[in-house]
């Protein structure tokens, strides 16, 4: 079955440590996205990529980094510069500009 | 600045009732308007979508109404069921863009 796989589902890290969230898709979609979700704040765009080896900052990119070396993969690194990293992180992909997103099941990151 | 404004933030409806969620936008370049349904701890899933060349689209108990002149669109959930209890997000996309702009979300609770 085609879809988006995010791993791990739950992640705990100590404050000051970098952590990388995995996102893999087998839908052959060109574009991929990372969103952050906090209670009552909806979905906020962190980074997105329309093609391999290219990505753009979203609305809240500070403290995050990404790479897009393969079409199938779009990992997100939450760096120690991110002041409030505890959140639910969602990865998504889309085939083209005429269709909606397919979302992964999310990673809940807790920094202690 | 949120490009899509969604209301209400939450609503409670009795089983069998109608749930109505409203969204408004300013950017007339938007030409794709999807709705997403999200259950707790899961990623959002595409529910139904509409383009501005139609005023209404129905899929089962879910209907989108679109008013291009007022720059508003709404989701109606007919015969609401407890299984419809979820958070619903409206979104919009410009024709020359991959990214979706999301509303802040509406938490719907259907009481049995």
Image (cartoon, rainbow, N blue to C red):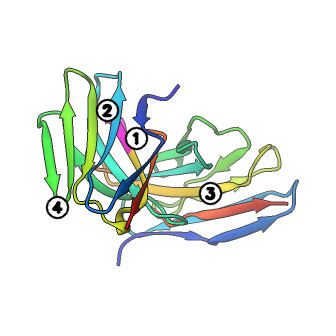
- Residue at the spot of label 1: B100
C-alpha distance separating marks 1 and 4: 25 Å
Tell me which residue sits at (28%, 29%) in the image: B72
Tell me which residue sits at (72%, 68%) in the image: A11
Q: State left or right for residue B57 relative to residue A14.
A: left
Q: Is residue A103 above or below residue B28?
A: below
Do marks 2 and 3 share a subunit?
no
Frontmost of labels 3 and 4 is 4
- Residue at the spot of label 3: A88
- Helix, strand or loop at label 2? It is loop
Q: State left or right for residue A105 relative to residue B56.
A: right
Q: Residues within 10 Å of mark 2 (few under 14, many from 20)?
A: few
C-alpha distance separating marks 3 and 1: 18 Å
- Helix, strand or loop at label 1? It is loop
Q: Position of residue B101 (x, y in %)?
A: 42, 37
Q: State left or right for residue A29 relative to residue A110.
A: left
- Residue at the spot of label 4: B60
Please give the chain letter of the residue carrying mark 1: B
Tell me which residue sits at (12%, 34%) in the image: B53
Q: Is residue A39 above or below residue B100?
A: below
Q: Position of residue B45 (x, y in %)?
A: 38, 60
Query: Which span is picked out in magenta?
Result: B90-101
């Amino acid at each position: 079955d085609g879809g988006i796989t995010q791993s791990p589902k739950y992640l705990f890290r100590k404050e000051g440590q970098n952590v990388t969230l995995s996102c893999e898709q087998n839908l052959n979609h060109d574009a991929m996205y990372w969103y952050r979700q906090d209670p009552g704040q909806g979905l906020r765009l962190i980074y997105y990529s329309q093609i391999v080896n290219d990505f753009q900052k979203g609305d809240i990119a500070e403290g995050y980094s990404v790479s897009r070396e393969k079409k199938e993969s779009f990992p997100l690194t939450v760096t120690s510069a991110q002041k409030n990293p505890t959140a639910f992180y969602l990865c998504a992909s889309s085939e083209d500009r005429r269709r909606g997103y397919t979302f992964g099941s999310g990673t809940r990151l807790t920094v202690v | 600045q949120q490009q899509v404004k969604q209301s209400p933030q939450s609503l409670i409806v009795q089983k069998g009732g109608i749930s109505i969620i409203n969204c408004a936008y300013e950017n007339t370049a938007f030409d794709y308007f999807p709705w997403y349904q999200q259950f707790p701890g899961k990623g959002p899933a595409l529910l139904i979508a509409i383009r501005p060349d139609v005023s209404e689209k129905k899929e089962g108990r879910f209907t989108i109404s679109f008013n291009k002149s007022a720059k508003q669109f709404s989701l109606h959930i007919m015969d609401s069921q407890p299984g419809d209890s979820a958070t619903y997000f409206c979104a919009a996309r410009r024709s020359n863009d991959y990214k979706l702009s999301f509303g802040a979300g509406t938490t719907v609770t259907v009481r049995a």
